[in-house]
Image (tube, coloured by chain):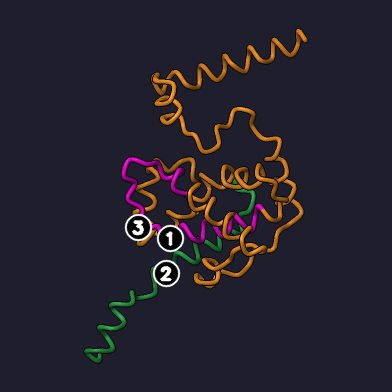
Chain colours: A green, B orange
């Protein structure tokens, strides 16, 4: 049991958001090739 | 969320898994929340300040989780390195550093009274806590086996207790 479960939850959500976000190079590639 | 204690993955494995499995980082947080909070409490932080600094430490760790290579160092040593940098930056600026938290779009976490009390309890904490020095590191310094370190620590504490009782 953590002392600050809310922080643990926020970190997991942040990690999830990072996973969902395409990397910078993929974004540039998409823009470049219009995909 | 699965419970950290039942997950047998090593710290480097959890860090490597973080990119594809967000829960993995939550498990790492559960493992090292107390040592990191204690790290800041020991350096004079209030429970509230320790919580904010801990949040920033783990946010920064999340940002660079993919870059952790170990190179013979344990993950906790790496986390303490981040904690030390967060503390230095915060002291330098006179406010709690929160760049990593903002970069991750993380909302500041409001602390409950229960959380503050639980953090405060860590201050007394375990006597047998080697902070940044891990068992392998101590074993290396003492030139003994890693298995011997906890035994020696217990013996030392026992001796100390006896002497204090005698005094």
Determine the CA span between mark 1 and mark 3: 16 Å
In the rendered structure, are the residues bearing label 1 and label 2 in contact, judged by CB atoms less than 8 Å apart? yes
SS for tag 1?
Answer: helix
Residue extent of the magenta highlight: B50-79
- Residue B158: percent from left, percent from top: 63, 14
| Residues flagged by tags 1 and 2 on a common chain | no
The residue at which mark 1 appears reads as B22
Residue ranking furthest to the front = B92
Magenta stretch encompasses residue B67? yes
Nearer the observer, disc 1 or disc 2?
2
In the rendered structure, the answer to whether residue B132 lies left or right of residue A2 reads left
Q: Indicate left or right for A10 with B61 as reference.
A: right
**Occupied quadrant, residue B63:** bottom left
Q: Chain of mark 1?
A: B
The x, y position of residue B56, in whole percent, is 56, 60
Residue A3, percent across and down?
64, 49
Q: Residue at x 70, y 10 (%)?
A: B163
Q: Nearer the viewer, residue B154 or B117?
A: B154
Q: Residues within 10 Å of mark 1 (few under 14, many from 20)?
A: many
- Disc 2 crowd rating (10 Å Cα; few below 14, some 14-19, many 20+) is some
According to the picture, the residue beneath numbered tag 2 turns out to be A18
Q: Residue at x 63, y 64 (%)?
A: B93
In whole angstroms, how far apart are the C-alphas of marks 1 and 2? 9 Å
Residue that appears at 44% across and 18% down: B148
Where is residue B57? Give x, y as percent: 53, 56
Question: Reading the chain from its start, which is encountered first: label 1 or label 3?
Answer: 1
Residue with the mark numbered 3: B67
Distance from disc 2 to disc 3, alpha carbons, whole Å, reads 15 Å
Q: Is residue A4 above or below residue A27?
A: above
Closest to the observer, B159 or B17: B159
């Amino acid at each position: 049991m953590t002392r600050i479960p809310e922080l643990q939850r926020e970190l997991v959500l942040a990690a999830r958001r990072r996973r969902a976000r395409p990397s910078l190079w993929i974004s540039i590639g998409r823009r470049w090739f219009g995909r | 969320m699965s419970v950290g204690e039942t997950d047998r993955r090593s710290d480097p494995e959890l860090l490597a898994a973080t990119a594809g499995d967000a829960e993995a980082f939550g498990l790492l947080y559960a493992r090292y929340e107390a040592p990191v909070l204690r790290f800041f409490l020991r350096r004079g932080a209030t429970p509230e300040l320790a919580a904010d600094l801990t949040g920033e430490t783990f946010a920064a760790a999340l940002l660079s989780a993919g870059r952790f290579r170990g190179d013979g160092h344990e993950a906790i040593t790496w986390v303490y390195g981040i904690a030390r940098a967060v503390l230095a930056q915060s002291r330098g600026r006179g406010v709690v550093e929160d760049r990593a938290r903002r970069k991750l779009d993380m909302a500041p976490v409001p602390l409950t009274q229960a959380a503050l009390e639980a953090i405060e309890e860590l201050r007394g904490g375990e006597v047998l806590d080697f902070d940044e020095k891990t068992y392998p590191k101590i074993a290396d310094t003492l030139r003994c086996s890693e298995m011997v370190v906890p035994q020696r620590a217990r013996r030392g504490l026992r001796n100390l207790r006896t002497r204090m009782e005698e005094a």
